[in-house]
Amino acid sequence: MARVFSGVQPTGNLHLGNYLGAIRNFTRLQDDNECLYCVVDMHAVTVWQDPDVLKNSTREVTAAFLASGIDPKNHIVFNQSRVPQHAEIAWVFNCVARMGWLNRMTQFKEKAGKNRENASVGLYVYPNLMAADILAYKATHVPVGEDQKQHLELARDIAQKFNNDFGVEQFPIVEPLILDSAARVMSLRDGRKKMSKSDVSDYSRLNLNDDADTIALKVRKARTDPDPVPDGSPEGGNRASRPEAFNLLEIYAALADQSISQIQQEFGGRQFSEFKKALANLAVEKLGPIGAEMRRFASDPKYIDSVLFDGAERARAIAGPIRDEVYEIMGFLRG
């Protein structure tokens, strides 16, 4: 049985993109794998976080995991900062990884922008922490979307260099589990921008904790164009020429677990008012129960905290001996 690790940052306002791009896939991996799902709160603080907001966001992500069907008894759900082995192994990896490797990481360039000199050191080296997250458990597989492939390649490079440097086979070479094509969900207000919690308009996204009426309203107000639903013909346009139209098609296809062509066969040539009604019903059917469960879990923070506490104990039981092996290989005197 493969050991799978993945994490989600507690940055608040989880939305449809987070669900289709990550959390839904987590639930599907449970049946055939040993899974560790982590709320990566140490990654979140690479930029400043309000402490109270961070606590609430950590619980919100946990609630989303549970509401989506992740089983915290048969698998491990925990927050990163409760397991010190992540940081301990990350320091080792800071000494294994090369500056040139980190300089090639495109996400640092995107997140730091023009203020690179003012970015935190943590933001620069956080790919090493991400590698430690995975390898602290000797995970063999990691579900990844397009924006995380580079970081997984770095984790593989670090594992290989550590093994080569010390003449050991300590760490596995992690394999990617490529997530489905629905991972890139675009804004409901601009089909060229990724759906984001930071968008000023709440109508740009479907939040996982939205109620049924709010979901339906947002879908009705989603931007389209005056032409009918694309039917797959050249005259019907493509993603580049009709980004909002195809975004809604892709959302429908993802929620229905169907292909774009199947949706076009059913709705192609119809008016968007009719299609939006069907999409709203489908979104309410799929997301409504998750939102209701999230609100139920959110009303019981003690239960969420107990899940994280239990998960962290079990995570430490795996990561502790692996950290000890790493320290012994490195030559650290202990005991």
Image: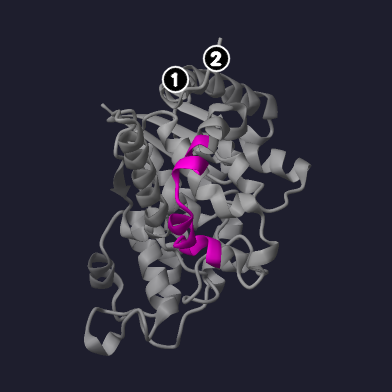
As helix, strand or loop, the secondary structure at mark 2 comes to: loop
Magenta residue check for 12: no
What is the CA distance from the residue labelled 1 to the residue labelled 2?
Answer: 8 Å
Q: Residues within 10 Å of mark 1 (few under 14, many from 20)?
A: few
Q: Residue at point 64% right, 36% down?
A: 59
Report which quarter residue 119 is drawn in. Answer: bottom right
The correct choice, above or below, for 239 with respect to 331 in the image is below
Range shown magenta: 92-109
Q: Nearer the viewer, residue 249 or 288?
A: 249
The residue positioned 45% from the left and 85% from the top of the image is 225
Q: Which residue is mark 2?
A: 334
| Residue 272: % across, % down | 42, 77
Q: Is there CB contact under 8 Å for labels 1 and 2?
A: yes
- How far across and how far down the image is residue 101, in percent? 43, 56
* Residue underneath mark 1: 328
Mark 1 lies on a secondary structure that is: helix
Give the total number of marks visible in the rendering.
2
